[in-house]
Image: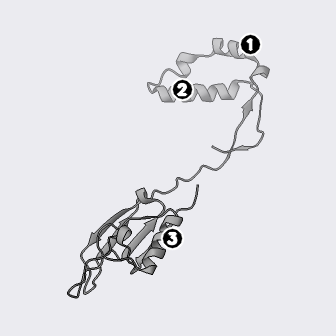
Amino acid sequence: MSPEISILGDFNVHHQLWLSSPFTDHPGELAYNFAILHDLEQLVQHPTCIPDRLGDTPNILDLFLTSNPPAYAVTLSSPLGSSDHNLISLSCPITPIPPQDPPKRMCLWRFASASWGDLRRYFADFPWNDYCFRVRDPSLCAERITEDLMHFIFLPGTMPGLFSN
């Protein structure tokens, strides 16, 4: 995965084909070649410079070049104060990276070494109705059974190391 590149600013460059300018200047050609060379897309699509002299035309002089166009939304608004440039707003939804659980020790059970005969006798003699099924909550019943089994069953295991989730 390559790093994301985003470059924005008032470039004051002109390019007929790329930026719909009335002419192409040398800085405009350089900016265009740079964007192509680095696979950047220019997201500002409407004029950002408002003409303040007779004969001037609206131009896209403020650029936002990025290698990840789908991640951004560009909005133009009226100029602030006496500026001759429209206000450009960029939005980029950022989602936080969820925290990772710390590695945990896991027990590897050795089922082949379990005392299955003792377990069967235990199940046969256990007072299930008195101990577990007096509660109506199935989750609580399952929790009680699990606790009891883990307490009385003999199942050898090892704790070899840390495992990540």
Q: What is the count of numbered marks? A: 3
Confirm or deny contact between disc 3 and disc 1 (CB under 8 A): no
Report the side of 33 relative to 100 (left or right).
left
Q: CA distance from mark 3 to mark 1?
A: 76 Å
Q: On the image, numbered disc 1 is attached to which residue?
A: 117
At 70% from the left and 17% from the top, the residue drawn is 119
Quadrant hosting residue 32: bottom left
Decide: is 115 above or below 160: above
Decide: is 61 above or below 68: below
- Of the two numbered discs 3 and 1 on the same chain, state the one appearing first in sequence: 3
What element does badge 3 sit on? helix
Q: Which mark is residue 142?
A: 2
Quadrant hosting residue 56: bottom left
Quadrant hosting residue 22: bottom left
Q: On the image, numbered disc 3 is attached to which residue?
A: 34
What element does badge 2 sit on? helix
Mark 3 or 1, closer to the camera: 3
The quadrant of the picture occupied by the C terminus is top right
The quadrant of the picture occupied by the N terminus is bottom right
Q: CA distance from mark 3 to mark 2?
A: 65 Å
Q: Position of residue 67 (x, y in %)?
A: 48, 62
Q: Position of residue 36 (x, y in %)?
A: 49, 65
Mark 3 or 2, closer to the camera: 3
Which amino acid lies under the numbered mark 3 shown in the image of this protein? Phe
At 76% from the left and 26% from the top, the residue drawn is 110
Which amino acid lies under the numbered mark 1 shown in the image of this protein? Gly
Q: Position of residue 44 (x, y in %)?
A: 35, 68
Residue placed most toward the observer, 155 or 19:
19
Circle 3 crowding by C-alpha within 10 Å: few under 14, some 14–19, many from 20: few
Circle 2 crowding by C-alpha within 10 Å: few under 14, some 14–19, many from 20: few
Which amino acid lies under the numbered mark 2 shown in the image of this protein? Ala
